[in-house]
Image (cartoon, helix red, strand yellow):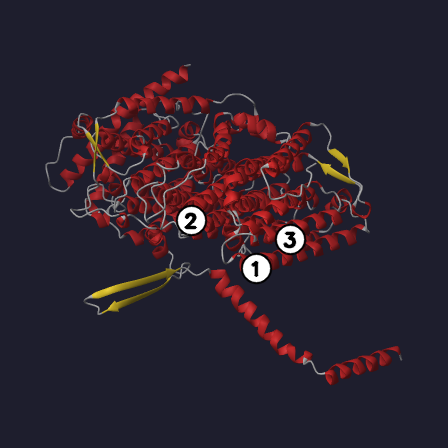
Amino acid sequence: MSWLGNALVSLLLLLALAPLLEGAIRTLKARLQGRKGPSPLQPYRDLWKRLRKESVRPEDTSPLYGWLPPLSLAISLLAGLFVPLIGPAALSGAGDAFWFLGLLALTRFVIGLAGFDAAGPFGALGSSREMTLGGFVEPVLFLGLLPPALASGSTDLSVLAAHAGPFAQHSPLTLFFGGLGLAVAIVAEVGRLPVDNPDTHLELTMMHEAITLEYGGPLLALLELGRMVRQFLLLRFWWVLYGAFAGGPAAWVGLAVLAGGLALLESQSVKLRYLRLPRLLGTATLLSGLAVLLLAAPGGGI
Amino acid sequence: MAAAIGGWDRGRLPLYLWGLAAVLILATAWEGLFSPRPLWIPFPLGFYGNHLLVDPLSAWFLLLLALVFGLIAASSGPYLQHLPDRSRRLVRMVLPLFLLSMVLVLTAHQVLLFLLAWEVMTVTSYLLVVAGTDPRAETNGFVYLVMTHIGTGFLLLFFLLLGGLDGGNLSFSALAQVAGHLSPGLKGVLGLLALAGLGMKLGLLPVHIWLPRAHPVAPAPVSALMSGVMLKMALYLMIRVFLFWLAPLPLPLDLALVVLGLLTGLFGVLYAVVESDLKTFLAYSSIEQMGIATAILGLAALAQTLHHPALTALLLFALLLHALVHGLAKGGLFLAAGYLEALTGTRDLNRLGGLWSRLPSLATAFLAGALTLSALPPFPGFWVEWLLLQGGLHLGLVHSPLAVLLLLVVAAIGMIGALAASAFLKAFGLVFLGRARSERPPLHVPSAQRILLFPAAVLGGMVLLPGSVGWLLLRVVPSAARVLAITPLGWFLGSAAISPGITAVLLLLLTLLLGRGVRPRTDTSPLWACGGTATPAVQCSDPAYGKGLRLMLPGLFRAERSLVVEGSNYFPMRMRYEGRIPRLFERYLYLPSVRRLLSAARVLRVLQSGGVRLYLTYLVGTLLLLLAFAW
């Protein structure tokens, strides 16, 4: 039952570190924008505050209302068991990278349900935007998975982590293009600028935020924690596939570098108009496709 | 063998007989799956052959037929009561014949019997479609009839050509023997003929237009049977022809199958996202799923052309799994939609809403079907997509020039899956969540709605015990066992063991219980709508949900709008807004062709002026011509 121990450790690690990553990104963003900013531990304080509050439910919600936030958090944590955090992933034999991406898609669906539930004006529109965007992001996520999978012959994330070094050595150009394409998709999936502004409260610009409008108190805390866990996992996912040193302490340094990159990107870019997002993601698709073609070309590495 | 039981209008006896028929078919399927040799059932029909054959491939589809028909038998009672007399009588009389024809299609071993059964299937389904109460049932049924017969014409050509090459022996085994040794050019021609004929029945681009017309207007049990099972009949023959008879196919045909399948899938799902009618939405979803099935078939044929029997077996495994999962899920969804229409009087997503509290079982059944067809883990729809991706990946690993195809397949499948999830979220959310968007009479909910949970239960059972399905399916494709063992999910599908998937699910439940521990003290309050009253009309409607996608792809969705304002522009008294999305293929391909055909016919009408003298001239002219020839 060693995998059970591994699973518990992974879960606790995720729950403990995900808010820290979010806090670090926020503090870094503030500093880059010339503000002093909150401390990196602020998300912990926010979550604790919300967990102790009462929750108010809109009148016409279905019985799903109270269950969707814990479900979204549970699925995000379960997805984390397929990603190698310290050593191989806990459930690495039972599922691979496609399972991981599929579970993230399931989370998107569950949160989309939450948007419809409250019968409010903005919720379902937020769901519509999230799911339509998902239609353009999923191909890029799948394609971004292909070059490392083709190079190492497996889609299991623990195996891919072990092969990260040789992959980087043999195919640097593929690494560049593939990594760039996947990075764009991950920015979209995580919901950061230039795709979606996590700090906005303007109805016309909201995507994920529109769905969480009708939630408050502990349920909102669970939704936010789920979002932070997914952010952590997606950054780790990128690093396992395209970071050259996927194991050991270098991996945590890499994660910090990625967080810094996100903060920098958010400070530099404006939010793209929603209707322009397919163009951005189409470019990312082409980049990922180029990476696969480079790999498959004679002398490319497979 | 299923007995064709003529139904009569009184009592519940016909439904019990239908149930009995379903059980008999199930027993046959079970026998077929587990007996060591294919079952030869003597069925002497003289000119039409002497036997029926139940081999594992037929048995798998018979299993699907039995499950769906059993579900219909169990749940259609109250629904049929609400149909008008004429429709009800028609359905009760013709549905068993439809069933019989499908059984014969699956077990026929001789060309003439097969074609006879195919034709009976077409005609009975036409009669069942026009039994619907929708005012457009007759027109749409006619379109369906015409298109299916064009397809059957191609199929007839295919069989004629193949039978001619065979020297007149019309049994399937003789045809299979001959077809395997043909030249690639001839195989290509035969393959194209078969594709044209069967693709029309399957609903592939560009001959899919009958699906969104015929399936919504038919009565619910008929739609369920048509979408869940009849489409699979075409798939069954395609598997036989492409993977067993004409194997190995020429490479361009494989690629054509894959590309056509992916295009169909994309087209279907894009139209599903913007569709407001619930049953038409389900029809477009069927088009999408059949596109995916064709893509899987194409990849399997590709693996066979490149001489990889293990990958072929894996992809065939995926295809058969897809057939079962989709048939069950779609059958259940159509029955649920039929119930909804009977109870609320409308299929329009813009008029429904907030039905979870009144119809919890129906909502759960719908949600299970929606999750399955959206290819979301841990439901079986995701397994099919996963197997497809793994198969494609291994093909790309083995043959690196296929990387381009692999790219297309992976990207397209990703997009189709995510958009399907979006479409089903819309359907479920608009119908069951939120508040009711229009005034409705109070619902009288029959107790039979619980039966509709049966497909949900089967799908849920598949999640918990994937090995059970795999164990059954490996009877059909035994060589898949070896290659399945290589991949993690595959191992659990291929063995009867209980997978860590169950442990994962239990973990999920545990975390859910933790969520319960976080249970807050909840108060209810009215919805905040920026200070005004929150009427049901502020909710998202179907056009609003699809607007983003519509604006992103304006070339595909050429939406037409009309806005009529009564009163001046500053003080409008009334506004009337109409918007619609035209069906591209109908408007730009079919309508012009039909118009040209009709005008050509009008020109040719001159030849039949009705005057006796002109006809006498024809007679004399023909006589003179014949005399000239004889000389």
Which numbered tag is attached to residue B92?
none
- Mark 2 residue type: Gly
x then y, percent, for residue A146: 44, 39
x then y, percent, for residue A251: 31, 28
Q: State which tag comes first along the sequence, 3 or 1.
A: 3
Q: Secondary structure at mark 1?
A: helix
Which numbered tag is attached to residue B345?
2
User: Is disc 3 surrounded by few (<14), some (14 to 19) or many (20+) residues within 10 Å?
Assistant: some
Q: In the rendered image, which quarter contains the N terminus of chain B?
A: top right
The residue sitting at the right extreme is: B631
Task: Give how far apart the Cα atoms at labels 2 and 3 are.
Answer: 28 Å
Chain under callout 2:
B
> In this figure, which residue is indicated by the disc labeled 1?
B143
Chain under callout 3:
B
- Mark 1 residue type: Val
Q: State which tag comes first along the sequence, 1 or 2.
A: 1
> In this figure, which residue is indicated by the disc labeled 3?
B123
- Of residue B396 and residue B265, the one placed in the foreground of this image is B265
- Mark 3 residue type: Val
